[in-house]
Image (cartoon, rainbow, N blue to C red):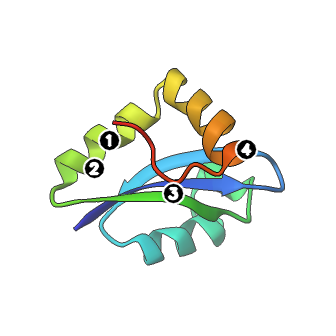
Amino acid sequence: MYTTYILYSEKFGKIYIGQTSDLARRILQHNSGKHRYTRRYIPWKILYTEHFETRSEAMKREKELKSHQRRNFIRNKLLNGGVRQLPD
């Protein structure tokens, strides 16, 4: 099982999108400062997740969510409007 996830740093207003096979471990890594980009914006909280059978599916969804249009949707709807399901 693979997870595509969106993290949010409320303190800094930053969004991070990634994918992993072990979400708990990955969140710990982000919040412990082990990753160059995310260490500057600790603490991170999980904003949204989607689960996939294969890594390639998770990577495809990660790429979709990282598009400029999707990032705007995340900011405008998911953060402000409380939407819990993103469109395909």
Q: Measured along the vertical axis of the image, is residue 88 above or below residue 35?
A: above
For the residues marked 4 and 1, what is the alpha-carbon distance in whole angstroms?
22 Å
Mark in the foreground, 4 or 3: 4
The residue that disc 4 covers is 80
Other residues around mark 3 within 10 Å, as few (<14) / some (14–19) / many (≥20)? some
- Indicate left or right for 49 with 69 as reference: left
Q: Which residue is mark 3?
A: 48
Q: Is residue 65 left or right of residue 76?
A: left
**CB-based contact (under 8 Å), mark 2 and mark 1:** yes
Residue 9 % position (x, y): 72, 55
Counting residues from the N terminus, which is met first, the one under dot 2 or under dot 3? 3
In the figure, residue 63 lies in which quadrant?
top left
> Mark 4 against mark 2, which lies toward the viewer?
4
Please give the residue where the numbered disc 1 appears in the rendered image: 61
Instruction: Give the image location of residue 27, x and y in percent.
Output: 53, 69
Viewer-nearest residue: 39 or 73: 73
Q: Quadrant of the C terminus?
A: top left
Q: Is residue 58 left or right of residue 45?
A: left
Tell whether 52 sits left or right of 37. Answer: left
**Proximity of marks 4 and 2: CB atoms separated by less than 8 Å:** no
Q: Which residue is mark 2?
A: 58
Say if mark 3 contacts mark 1, CB within 8 Å.
no
